[in-house]
Amino acid sequence: MANKKSALKAIRKGKKLQEKNSKLKDNLKWLVKKAEKAISEKSDKAREFVKQLEKAVDKAVQKGVLKENTGRRRKSRIMAKFNIAFSDKKSAE
């Protein structure tokens, strides 16, 4: 255990940040699951979930929870899945 007052404070801050970051990551995982499920079912809500996921990824990158390239890669992969799934709809209409 830390002896100095500042070291104790750093431990407290670290725990708070860890909790906050894990909540953001959990939310991202949940959104990814929802978006992928909606895309695979070709649901009307897929676009909404993809939009929410993009916003959440951008926010996580901005706050330093995700690295910039990781965020871009995640957004790119989900958009690729979305475009593949819904490109058939556009050509059919």
Image: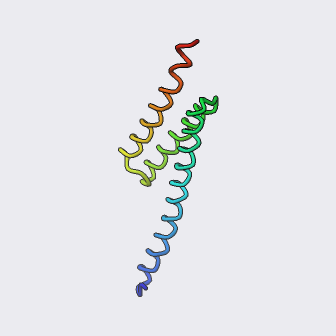
15 vs 35, nearest the viewer: 35
Residue depicted at x 50% and y 39%: 54
Can you name the residue that lies furthest to the right here? 44
Residue depicted at x 60% and y 34%: 48
Would residue 67 appear left or right of 18 to someone viewing this image? left
Would residue 77 appear left or right of 44 to someone viewing this image? left
Can you name the residue that lies furthest to the front here? 41
Where, by quadrant of the figure, is residue 31 drawn? top right
1 vs 42, nearest the viewer: 42
Can you name the residue that lies furthest to the top here? 93
What's the coloring here?
rainbow
Where is residue 22 shown, x and y percent of the image?
Answer: 51, 60
Residue depicted at x 52% and y 13%: 91
Can you name the residue that lies furthest to the bottom here? 3
Q: Quadrant of the N terminus?
A: bottom left
Where is residue 50 shown, x and y percent of the image?
Answer: 54, 36
Q: How many numbered dots are placed on residues in this image?
A: 0
Where is residue 59 shown, x and y percent of the image?
Answer: 49, 47
Q: Is residue 2 above or below residue 32?
A: below
Would residue 36 appear left or right of 6 to someone viewing this image? right
68 vs 28, nearest the viewer: 28
Residue depicted at x 47% and y 32%: 81
Where is residue 68 shown, x and y percent of the image?
Answer: 37, 46
Q: Is residue 84 above or below residue 69?
A: above
Would residue 73 appear left or right of 82 to someone viewing this image? left
Q: Quadrant of the C terminus?
A: top right
